Image (tube, grey):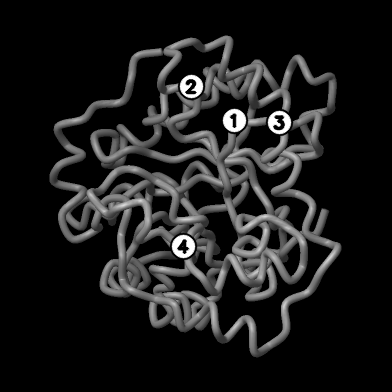
Amino acid sequence: MQSIKLADGRSIPQIGFGTAAIGEMHQDDGYVKDTVLKAIDAGYRHLDTASFYGNERSVGQAVLESGIAREQFFITTKVWDTQQGYQSTLTALEQSLERLQTDYADLYLVHWPYPEKTRPTWQAMEKLHSEGLAKSLGLSNFRKTDIQQLLKFAEIKPVYNQLELHPYHTQSQLSEFCQSKGMVVSCWSPLGSGSWSGVAKDEKPITDDTIVTLAEKYQVSVGQIILKWDCQRDRIVIPKSESDDNIKANLQLDSFTLTDDELDKIDGLNKNHRYGGDPDTAWKDNLNNPVPSR
């Protein structure tokens, strides 16, 4: 699987397996574990979770049951807003590692910007990094102003920013800024298929005529077209799926290459449609949503 080199010298698989909301309708930790095991069997080694997802224990159990050495995996987790602050961030990773049944996280992210807590949270993350508990440090949903604030005091620079990024929300200026600061851009909900907002299904990238036409041309799925667009733009993608076919298909992107003109056409589909939370307001709402106990 293709990897991308982070600014700290470590490599990260370009296609990760997203675990947010897996099994949401099942409320079954065994279902989550089995789904992650299917992903591992399909070839995923980059697993993306978070304390707020409530599934770290299931992800860790899947890794153990896979029989594959821990060193072969790249595991990302995140500190939630209610956990931010110096001591609470230290405790948060300790608890995440216990649930994951591992000695370290490959990548530890600040899940959402919480400007009042950014400095102590990041200083705690730097301590965790110095102790080898978090091999790489990064951000999630951080805006340009948040990054500028952090860079004023950070002794260890973030190497990664995970954004809601898809053909209808390309965040081109923010992406370019992140890359100029040595951060790899990662895409959550890369297909724009989330259901967190009231945007109608027919307003989503997976039904866009441009995407559909390209899928027909290359005889692949619309999802594969979008993921290939991201990969050719040197971004990390974190697709989430629960079906066997899609889990496998999301890794099978080597049979075609989009032309520069086709990449530009997809770039031009931007509508600034968010399907998830807005960083301008989400952190305030998140403070009313504690990390699940399991």
Q: How packed is label 4: few (under 14 Cα within 10 Å), some, or many (20 or more)?
A: many
Residue lying furthest bottom in this view?
A: 261
60 relative position to 25: left or right: right
Q: Secondary structure at mark 3?
A: helix
134 relative position to 126: left or right: right
The three-letter amino acid code for the residue at tag 3 is Asp
- Mark 4 vs mark 1, foreground winner is 4
Residue at the image point whose x is 61% and y is 58% from the top: 222
Q: Secondary structure at mark 4?
A: helix
The three-letter amino acid code for the residue at tag 1 is Glu
- Mark 3 vs mark 2, foreground winner is 3
Residue 106 on image: x %, y %:
63, 43
Pointers 1 and 2 in contact (C-beta within 8 Å): yes
Residue at numbered disc 2: 23
Q: Is residue 173 visible?
A: yes
Residue at the image point whose x is 67% and y is 55% from the top: 221
Which one is earlier in the sequence, the residue at label 3 or at label 2?
2
Up-down: is 31 above or below 118?
Answer: above
Q: Secondary structure at mark 2?
A: loop
Which one is earlier in the sequence, the residue at label 4 or at label 1?
4
**Which quadrant of the figure has residue 87?**
top left
What is the spatial separation of the Cα atoms under label 3 and label 4, in whole angstroms? 22 Å
Residue at numbered disc 4: 205
The three-letter amino acid code for the residue at tag 4 is Pro
Residue at numbered disc 3: 244
Residue at the image point whose x is 78% and y is 59% from the top: 253
Pointers 4 and 1 in contact (C-beta within 8 Å): no
151 relative position to 69: left or right: left
What is the spatial separation of the Cα atoms under label 2 and label 4, in whole angstroms? 24 Å
Residue at numbered disc 1: 242
